[in-house]
Structure formats: structure tokens, C-alpha cells
Image (cartoon, rainbow, N blue to C red):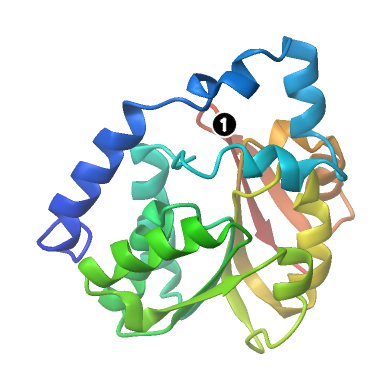
Amino acid sequence: MTTLTTPPVGPLLDRLFEEASATSPMDNPALAALAGGDHARLMRSKTDYLDFYGHLKDYPLAVSRETGLLLYMLARSLRARTVVEFGTSFGLSTLCLASALRDNGGGVVITSEFEPSKAARARANLTAGGLIDLVEIREGDALQTLSVDLPETIDLLLLDGAKALYSDILDRVESRLRPGALIVADNADYCPEYLERVRAPDGGYLSTPFAEDVELSMRVG
């Protein structure tokens, strides 16, 4: 029995994942009109991401159910107490991470979301799941919100916001990652700079692609 799979979190996640699978960002007319190259360019942009993701404020942009389970398992295995998340969206991944902290005996998930309406929905979902006491939602641009007041040590980092910023976010938290800390980067292919960094032989990480769309890295230095 785990917090992740029992009420209230289990049924809540079932509903949220079903809702997420029933919607697609390409249902948004502004995005559906983009040519494939334009979509990829926007995903890799460090200047247009606020406008791009603003168009997606009504879409969950959730991790897959499998990735959610992976996050729970990794956080439990690490006995994590401190987690940082870039990209809250509606809070599905946050629910998985906070469930692990509950079962680990406590801690905090610091999560950043620049879209106020999404932060509000995440807060409501975390409250419904009885996990809001383990979560600190920081509203605003993560380049600022994750630059201050971080824990002395971080056990796990989830990167699932604007893909082009993965390396920039890592810059802000890297000094707090403890040896053995894990980084889960969703859709990291959109940030070649990040992949080059964590895969470099002398970069201080061991890193490997995991499943179809996740890069899993471990801090070794």
C-alpha cells in the first residue's frame, strides 16, 4: 500500500491522467497552425517560451503515467526529502513526487510554474490529494524563482518546463545537488545543450536515455 495508489491520491491521479490523455496541445488553433519546423523552433527557443507556453495554459502538459510512477519509485529509492521541480502544470508529477515524500516520512517539493491559472489548479489538486503540506509552489519565471532560497541539499530534480531552459535551470540548482542525486529530464531532446552537458565524460554526471522521452542522470561529483 502506498500513498500513490490509495485514496485520495490514486483515484485523483487516475482521473487526471485520463483527462490529460483526452487532450492535446495541438487542439489549440494557434499551435495547430504551426508548421512542424516552427513548433520545434519554439520548443527550443530561449526567448519565446513565455508566449509559447502561455498558449498552453489550459492544457495539462503532464508527464506520462509511466513517468509518474518512475518519479515515485526513484524518490522512494533515494529516500528523498528535498525535491525541486521545474514546470508544475496541473500538478500530476508533483502529486507523484509528494506521495513519495509522504511515504518517506516527510520533506518538501519545491515546484515552479509561471502561469498563475496552472499554479492555482495544481494547488487545488494537491489539496484534494492531501499533499499540499509537502509542496511549495513558486509562481513566476523559474529562472528567478529557482535562483533563491533552495535547500542546502537536493535529492532529486525534475525538469519538465520550457525545454530550452534545462541547462539554465541546472545552473541554478547544481551546487545543491548531493552526490547520488538524480535528475529526470522530460523531452530533453529539445535541449541539445543540456544533453551534451550531462553526457560529457568529465561533466560530473552519469546519464542515459530512459524509455522514449526521458533522460535520467545521476550527480557523481
Residue 166, horizontal then vertical, whole percent: 75, 51
Residue 150 position, x and y percent, is: 67, 84
**Which image quarter: residue 120?**
bottom left
Out of 181 and 40, give the one closest to the viewer. 40
129 up-or-down from 25: above or below: below
Q: Is residue 169 visible?
A: yes
Q: Residue 25 at x, y = what percent?
A: 52, 27
Q: Quadrant of residue 180?
A: bottom right
Q: Measured along the vertical axis of the image, is residue 220 above or below residue 41?
A: below
> What residue sits 79% from the left and 50% below the top?
165
Residue picked out by circle 1:
213
How many other residues sit within 10 Å of disc 1, few (<14), some (14-19) or many (≥20)? some
Residue 72 or residue 22, whichever sits in front: 22
Residue 30 in the image: above or below residue 82? above
Kind of residue at badge 1: Asp
Quarter of the picture holding the N terminus: bottom left
> Is residue 15 found left or right of 57 in the rendered image?
left
Q: Quadrant of residue 183?
A: bottom right
Number of disc labels: 1
> What residue is drawn where x is 35% and y is 35%?
20
* 55 displayed left or right of 52: left
Is 10 positioned to the left or the right of 17 in the image? left
SS class of the residue under badge 1? loop
- In the image, taking residue 181 as reference, residue 130 lies left or right, namely left
Front-lying residue, 91 or 3: 91
The outermost residue toward the front is: 29
Residue 97 visible to an observer of this rendering: no
Q: Position of residue 30 (x, y in %)?
A: 64, 23
